[in-house]
Image (cartoon, rainbow, N blue to C red):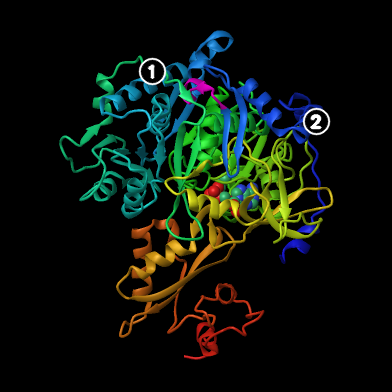
Amino acid sequence: MPDIESLLSEKRVFKPGKDFARAANWSKKDVAALRKDAAKNPTRFWAKMAKENVSFFSPWKKVLDWKPPFAKWFVGSKLNVSYNCIDRHLEGKNAWRRNKAAIIWEGEPGDKRVITYGELHREVCKFANALKALGVKKGDRVCLYMPMVPELAIAMLACTRIGAPHSIVFGGFSADALRDRIADAGAHVVITADGGYRRGAPFALKEAVDAAVSGDSPVESVVVVKRTGQDVTWKAGRDHWWHDLMAEASTKCPPAKLDAEHPLFILYTSGTTGKPKGILHTTAGYLTHVTTTFKAIFDIKDSDTYWCTADIGWITGHSYVIYGPLANGATTLMYEGVPTHPGPDRWWDVIERHRVSIFYTAPTAIRTFIRLGDEHPKSHDLSSLRLLGTVGEPINPEAWMWYHKVIGGKRCPIVDTWWQTETGGIMISPLPGAVDTKPGSGTLPFPGVDAAILDDDGNEVKPPDGGFLAVRQPWPGMLRGIWGDKERFREVYWSKWKRKGTYFAGDGAHRDKGGYFWIMGRVDDVMNVSGHRIGTMEVESALVSHPDVAESAVVGREDEITGTAVVAFVTPKANVLADDGLAKRLRDHVAKEIGAIAKPKDVRFTPALPKTRSGKIMRRLLRDIASGKETAGDTSTLEDFSVLAKLRGDED
Ligand code: PRX
């Protein structure tokens, strides 16, 4: 764990501002008391949070049923997520929120929509009825493949209203990736749009859906939002315009009373081996986790305008663009396009115009803006901001300092939040009115989260040693399984250590003497590119599916902007010309198979790959070569030393 030394030299500490601390939803005193209670009895803590933050139609009989690795939370209770996100803001003491903005949406071309809680209720009920009219029933999976438009939020909430789990596929994924995910989830209905806007031009989505559902597919209905007005091919009987279905739908749709463990959604994410895994989240635990963490970590007030820049196709968008904010009755801003269109100041312009007060983004974006120059944020009034957050990858202390000074005007606390698709909600983060921050550290686990750093044998390592990040107690937002694959669930997350029920996160980390956590990145074969997970295996499978490729190995190397860049070592088939043309064709092929995010930055050709005698590719060596390092470490098991020299370009 070589980064430990350098990180430990970080001595800067930032205390919450006095005014912020005084008005915080969770004060220092509250946090101390909650931590104490939660440490004694985490289940009791989460039960208290559920009572405070979530509305149930009927109460639970048991808080937790834990048969490692299978957990059930709030057993026996009934509730509905869309009721929690909408209806309860229209009733009783919260009824004034009917005309409060639930969603402020801005399209990339500059078009805008504001949807109040009252309107959201109408739209969600209507679309829930439209889904019913298409034959969608409780338990049926619905696939959403959409741009960042309000209809995406409406579709998600409509699914939750009738108990149809959604499976959202990021709009940047290819038709092939979409086909696999539709098949795995067994979805009969796909919701999409004709297209969306990115970098000033429309891109197509319906076209990819047509390709993904052609031939043998479970899909019976495709619902299409008209966003760009571009031409689409149409299959009568299967395809329906969103606006046609909505025109006929009733505005009355009582929320289904669902079981605490009713499946809420599936979200696919990359793992070390094989195909992407369908991570399953359920109703009561997930909602308790995201609602509580959102309220405490983002310190939400009714006067705030909150903006999380994540695409809803990723977990951050699920938990902290939609469910966490709406369950708290907050105003959440959704933006459709890229950060730099029409100019490099687009985001700062959005913040100024909408008076955004809480802003949550990824280190990759921050590093991009650092490179673009301070003049862009400085040309806008960012004084409305009072709290900043980051997520998705480790943030280097210098980027943290820039965020603090240039965006936060030195007055905004920064919450560096560590969590994963699998954890459902934030696990490690500062509480902004109560916890001192250090640039680059996620600080401390949320109360009720038993995070620890363990060695190979499962013993807790002493600060400042590095080890594997683990969670030793179940938490409400935890994944309940991998869709359709119980064994893989057990094996991937719960089998690293002998002690039953210890969750292996796949990240390396260490703690400093003050107990603060410092995340050092993935310890497995998952690359974190711009905060998005891509398995090396997935890219390798895409490459070898190309007719000119015999074998390939993919590794990550450090990249100043994206955190990690994908590097592919490729052995072409005999008689194939390995030139720049082939490299380009292979990059395009990966984009077609998976999506543009997985495109290798470098493609390096080699007549053979370095392997151990047992035939395992020596990735450590390849990682060193990819990053231009002298190959260090033990090469005694290397099958063919000449391969190494060739890869480095010593011969040729
Ligand atoms: O490596 C960690 C990194 O992102 C991984 C989870 O990726 P994903 O499931 O796509 O979810 C991303 C958004 C929650 C983790 O295993 N990661 C996430 N947040 C942080 C982080 N690494 C360091 N610091 C963070 N704050």
Judging by the rendered image, the residue that carries numbered circle 1 is 122
Secondary structure beneath label 2 = helix
Judging by the rendered image, the residue that carries numbered circle 2 is 28
Magenta-tinted stretch: 75-84
Let me know if residue 407 is in the magenta part.
no
For the residue pair 271 and 334, the one nearer the viewer reads as 271
Could you tell me the amino acid type at mark 1?
Answer: Arg
Secondary structure beneath label 1 = helix
Please name the residue shown 43% across and 31% down the image: 153
- Residue 314 in sight: yes
Question: Residue 374: percent from the left, percent from the top?
Answer: 62, 49
Question: Residue 13: percent from the left, percent from the top?
Answer: 81, 46
Q: How many marks?
A: 2
Q: CA distance from mark 2 to mark 1?
A: 40 Å
Q: Is residue 563 left or right of residue 1?
A: left
- Residue 393 in sight: no
For the residue pair 34 and 230, the one nearer the viewer reads as 34
Q: Is residue 438 left or right of residue 309?
A: right
